[in-house]
Image: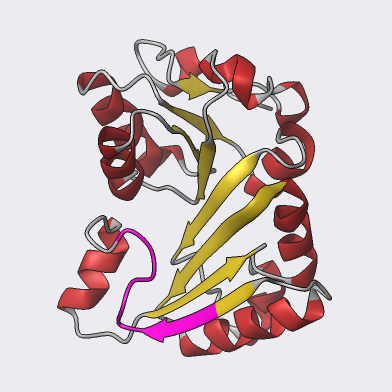
């Protein structure tokens, strides 16, 4: 059963959207303006998303995560900072993108360090597949971007394979190691943690 905002926190936040993905208003209605929208899938504590929202009040930001344990920090911090250009959805990202996000409406999808599900029997649970990239592509504006990152080499290989499996003609595909491709100074909590641990971080950028 879908949890309500009141069940998720003591004081319901206008930043938290807990409607079913099928009932989610269009972004222009959520933010009450026609500004460009960026979506972070698996936003966690939303360190990256909050930094972007503070730097770019002319852009709307939507954070999606299924785990309230971490996302609640992003909701609380956004509220304390008085950010009006950021909202959150506690739900499965696949459902939100499929049923709640219109075609040609998102300028950038940010997907940083998604769960790698390292055990072989669990790999089917991984988020990034050819089919999911096709779904994201259909929601992007012209020249829109998908920004991906992982510290897991096997998952990164799968991500690159998913680009091919999507069967789509991307305007640009760029790959780097230990060099962020987008917004170099704004990083996620996992990103900072993995950098400090000396892990190799792999980035993939797709332009529609």
Q: Is residue 118 visible?
A: no
Q: Is residue 185 visible?
A: yes
Name the residue nearer the viewer: 8 or 187: 187
Most extreme residue toward the left is 196
Relative to residue 128, is residue 189 drawn left or right? left
- Residue depicted at 59% across the width and 88% down the height: 157
Q: Which residues are magenta?
A: 174-183
- Residue depicted at 79% across the width and 73% down the height: 166
* Vertical order, 74 against 144 (above or below): above
Percent x, y of residue 23: 74, 21
- Residue depicted at 73% across the width and 57% down the height: 137
- Residue depicted at 63% across the width and 56% down the height: 143
Percent x, y of residue 171: 67, 71
Most extreme residue toward the right is 167
Relative to residue 145, is residue 181 drawn left or right? left
Percent x, y of residue 14: 44, 13
Quadrant where the image shows the C terminus: bottom right
* Vertical order, 65 against 147 (above or below): above
Name the residue nearer the viewer: 61 or 21: 61
Label the magenta part by its dominant secondary structure.
Answer: loop
Name the residue nearer the viewer: 166 or 152: 166
Percent x, y of residue 196: 15, 76
Name the residue nearer the viewer: 82 or 126: 82
By what rule are the colours in the image chosen?
secondary structure
Tell me how many marks there are: 0
Quadrant where the image shows the N terminus: top right
Q: Is residue 72 magenta?
A: no
């Amino acid at each position: 059963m879908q949890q309500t905002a009141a069940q998720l926190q003591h004081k319901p936040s206008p930043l938290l959207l807990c409607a079913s993905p099928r009932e989610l208003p269009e972004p222009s209605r959520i933010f009450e303006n026609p500004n460009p929208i960026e979506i972070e899938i698996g936003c966690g504590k939303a360190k990256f998303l909050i930094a972007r929202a503070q730097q770019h009040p002319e852009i709307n930001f939507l954070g999606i995560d299924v785990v309230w344990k971490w996302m609640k920090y992003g909701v609380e911090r956004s509220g304390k900072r008085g950010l009006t250009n950021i909202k959150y959805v506690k739900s499965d990202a696949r459902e939100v993108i499929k049923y709640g996000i219109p075609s040609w409406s998102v300028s950038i999808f940010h997907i940083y360090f998604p769960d790698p599900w390292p055990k072989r029997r669990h790999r089917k649970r991984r988020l990034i597949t050819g089919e999911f990239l096709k779904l994201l592509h259909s929601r992007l504006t012209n020249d829109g971007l998908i920004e991906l990152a992982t510290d897991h080499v096997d998952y990164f290989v799968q991500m690159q394979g998913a680009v091919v499996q999507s069967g789509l003609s991307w305007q640009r595909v760029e790959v780097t190691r230990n060099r962020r491709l987008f917004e170099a100074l704004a990083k996620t909590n996992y990103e900072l943690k993995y950098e400090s641990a000396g892990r190799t971080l792999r980035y993939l950028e797709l332009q529609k």
